[in-house]
């Protein structure tokens, strides 16, 4: 199934929609002006973007051979498997938690994911992390997204939170794309 957001243009539309909703609600004090309907639209855009990222992360995870899962461009930066397991961790925790949903793993369990380097296990966790995020975010009542919540010591509106999380996940997608290019791996959607 092809999604409207599976192209760069589609992703730009989703990000622009989230940004427009953010600007419509700015500053944070106006977060209460969001309606459950606009919050539901934001949540749908957030989930659509997560689906695009899920497809791309899993495509790259499959494209990397097992022997490159521990590859890193230099010391001090994440390896291929570490980037993928970070994203699994964000699916299990950060993406839903930012919107008030429970996490699937404890902090210790989440940190332990970084040690996994087996390709099949990594792909399984990325798949399950995104599935958990989708399931828990879909269950969130949009009425609970009309206000703001504290994240990292700062009050943020739901649009700010969604852009923050999605931006972080897209940053790591770019990192993994760079790793692929450095290893002469063509991302599946570029073929």
Image: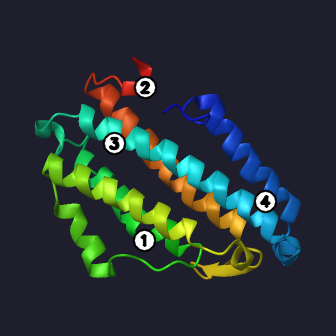
Marks 1 and 3, how far apart at CA: 18 Å
Question: How busy is the neighbourhood of tag 2: few (under 14 within 10 Å), some, or many (20 plus)?
Answer: few
Nearer-N-terminus badge (4/2): 4
Q: Which residue is mark 2?
A: 189
**Looking at the image, which residue is at 16% across and 46% down?**
119
Q: Considering the numbered disc 2 on the image, is that residue within a helix, a strand or a loop?
A: helix
Q: Quadrant of the C terminus?
A: top left
Q: Which residue is mark 4?
A: 22
Q: Considering the numbered disc 1 on the image, is that residue within a helix, a strand or a loop?
A: helix
Work out whether residue 99 or residue 47 is closer to the camera in this orientation and state it.
47
Q: In which image quadrant can residue 159 be found? A: bottom right
Q: Which residue is mark 1?
A: 93
Marks 4 and 2, how far apart at CA: 30 Å
Marks 1 and 2, how far apart at CA: 27 Å
Q: Are marks 1 and 2 in contact (CB under 8 Å)?
A: no
Q: Is residue 151 left or right of residue 29?
A: left
Q: Where in the figure is residue 176, as x and y percent of width and height?
A: 36, 40
Nearer-N-terminus badge (3/2): 3
Q: Considering the numbered disc 3 on the image, is that residue within a helix, a strand or a loop?
A: helix
Nearer-N-terminus badge (1/4): 4
- Check the image and report above or below for 58 versus 20: above
Q: Which residue is mark 3?
A: 58
Marks 4 and 3, how far apart at CA: 29 Å
Marks 3 and 2, how far apart at CA: 11 Å
Nearer-N-terminus badge (4/3): 4
Q: Are marks 4 and 3 in contact (CB under 8 Å)?
A: no
In this view, the mark in front (4 or 2) = 2
Q: Where in the figure is residue 29, as x and y percent of width and height?
A: 85, 78
- Check the image and report above or below for 40 versus 157: above
Work out whether residue 164 or residue 119 is closer to the camera in this orientation and state it.
119
């Amino acid at each position: 199934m092809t999604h409207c957001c599976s192209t760069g243009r589609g992703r730009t539309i989703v990000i622009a929609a989230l940004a427009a909703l953010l600007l419509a609600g700015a500053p944070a004090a106006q977060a209460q002006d969001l309606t459950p309907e606009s919050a539901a639209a934001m949540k749908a855009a957030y989930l659509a973007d997560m689906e695009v990222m899920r497809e791309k992360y899993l495509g790259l995870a499959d494209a990397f051979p097992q022997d490159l899962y521990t590859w890193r461009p230099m010391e001090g930066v994440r390896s291929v498997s570490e980037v993928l397991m970070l994203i699994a961790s964000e699916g299990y925790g950060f993406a839903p938690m930012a919107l008030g949903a429970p996490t699937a793993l404890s902090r210790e369990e989440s940190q332990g994911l970084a040690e996994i380097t087996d390709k099949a296990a990594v792909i399984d966790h990325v798949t399950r992390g995104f599935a958990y995020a989708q399931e828990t975010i879909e269950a969130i009542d949009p009425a609970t997204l009309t206000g703001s919540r504290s994240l990292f010591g700062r009050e943020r509106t739901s649009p700010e939170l969604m852009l923050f999380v999605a931006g972080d996940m897209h940053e790591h997608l770019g990192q993994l794309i760079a790793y692929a290019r450095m290893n002469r791996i063509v991302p599946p959607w570029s073929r």
